[in-house]
Image (spheres, grey):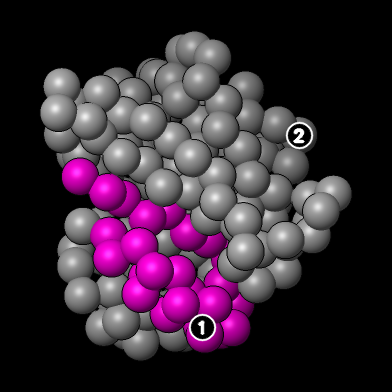
Amino acid sequence: MKVLIVSDTHRKNDTFFNVVKLHKPDMVIHCGDAEGAEEMLQEAAECPFYIVLGNNDFFSDLPRELEIQVGKYKLWVTHGHTYYVSAGSDYIKREAAARGMDIVCYGHTHRPVIDLSGPAIALNPGSLSYPRQENRRPSYIIMETDRNGEAHFTVAYL
């Protein structure tokens, strides 16, 4: 299974459309800040699409958090801004583990992270629209499960 994990698209949707066409994922997870474009993004995905409320998704009825099963993994999806993610992923990883989650997917910082150290895996795809990491390239994460059900993660840049 191939899961595309994105965040912080901020209505700059063309990049998302291009990434979906490129990868043809089996599932898309959006970690918030679509700014009202969620229906367009869902339609373009052409697969199961999960999205949560970001701090810039004003007047939206999107859920603040989701729990999703991907193979043997329990994923918790949140934007992350209420879990101190600007200071790192330690707090949100502990919270994920306390909830019985294997993986937490979050956004908000616009900086990609794959943190495999315990107690849970933390994934932040960065931003497709306004990247803030050193190279300033739009980023996303591909999560793929192999034939044994093991997950592998890759940060991809445009």
Give the structural element (helix, strand or loop) at label 2: helix
Magenta run includes residue 11:
yes
Q: Residues within 10 Å of mark 2 (few under 14, many from 20)?
A: few
Disc 1 target residue: 13
The residue positioned 48% from the left and 48% from the top of the image is 141
Q: Which amino acid does the dot numbered 1 rest on? A: Asn
Q: Nearer the viewer, residue 147 or 34?
A: 147
The residue positioned 21% from the left and 75% from the top of the image is 46
Q: Quadrant of the C terminus?
A: bottom right
Q: Residues within 10 Å of mark 1 (few under 14, many from 20)?
A: some
Q: Position of residue 1 (x, y in %)?
A: 20, 45
Residue positioned most to the top: 118
Disc 2 target residue: 87
Q: Nearer the viewer, residue 24 or 106?
A: 24
In magenta, the rendered stretch is 1-25
Q: Position of residue 90 (x, y in %)?
A: 62, 22
Give the structural element (helix, strand or loop) at label 1: helix
